[in-house]
Image: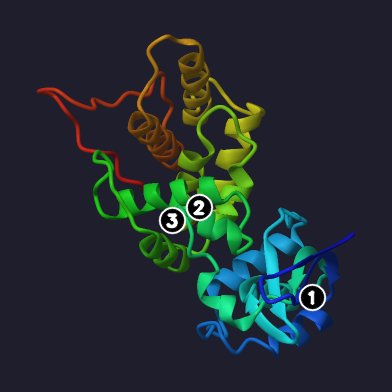
Amino acid sequence: MTKETTNENTSIVKAEVTTITPELAAKMLLGNVRNRPMPSNSPRVKIIADAIRRGEWELNGEAIIMNGSRLLDGQFRLAACVMANMPIQALVVHGVRDEAFHTIDSGTSRSAHDVLSLSGIPNARHVVSALKWVYRYKTGRTQSKVILTTPQIEELLELYRGVASSTSQCRHIRVVAPSILAAAHYLFGEIDKESADRFVTQLNSGLDLNLGDGVYVLRERLLADKLSKGHLTETYRFALIIRAWNARRAGAAVRSLKWVESGPTQQAFPVIK
């Protein structure tokens, strides 16, 4: 489907949904002369490429913008198409004047998840939240809110590259917020990826769990919390997830999972073991 319109200088602007093959993407990238240089080993490109390979690429209406053979916007998505060596469908806008380059993305300030989404990263909202939890744990700020700028989020995405993959793995889980579990999965995976995968899978399904298993106790506690009037805080849930992991790692049977979040007997936030 093609849509044509006319810009203020009467040149034709044409928008069409295009199947972009890796070969076409490489050709379009040859016109990338106006964007900031893109590192050859860009983590963002790899994240998008991995999503394409997993079948998570979505035609979301965000355009790749061209003026003739000159690429004005879309370099990360095109580079990911080449890296994945798989075709993608995308809206391509042709005929945008070079003079309009400085106006691209310069309107209403976009949130961090808007920026990641525009780059083609799936589940961007959950990815941003998970990155914040990883950052809070790594910096010892789990019990205080943090405000991070979009550039800081982008830096965290490059530093903790596996968070996007963890988010994809946890995105359908409903017993707890996907972003909290994704952060935990990523942090657990730094110690033992196979055990982290099994932890998430069993927490979601409830299969093959014994009564004294920390994951069983955690699942029951989280399901009960969903039905209660006074819900646990996200920080408390994160602490319980870590305690369940630590119990399983230690081979310890548990009857309950608790953490004193505040008050005179407040406990330190659990450390992942």
Which label belongs to residue 109? 3
Q: Position of residue 47 (x, y in %)?
A: 60, 65
Image depth: mark 2 or mark 3 in front: 3
Name the residue that disc number 1 marks.
85
Q: Quadrant of residue 154?
A: bottom left
- What is the residue that sits farthest to the right in this orientation? 1
Where, quadrant-wise, is the N terminus in this rendering?
bottom right
35 to the left or right of 18: left
55 to the left or right of 32: right
Q: Position of residue 114 (x, y in %)?
A: 53, 54
Q: Position of residue 241 (x, y in %)?
A: 43, 35
Name the residue that disc number 2 marks.
113
Of the residues shown, which amino acid type is indicated by label 2? His
At label 2, counting other C-alpha atoms closer than 10 Å, the crowd grade (few under 14, some 14-19, many 20 or more) is many
Note whether 128 is above or below 228 in the view shown: below
Q: Earlier in the sequence, mark 2 or mark 1?
A: 1
Q: Quadrant of residue 229?
A: top left
Mark 2 secondary-structure assignment: helix
Q: How many marks?
A: 3
Residue toward you, 94 or 195:
94
At label 3, counting other C-alpha atoms closer than 10 Å, the crowd grade (few under 14, some 14-19, many 20 or more) is few
Q: Earlier in the sequence, mark 3 or mark 1?
A: 1
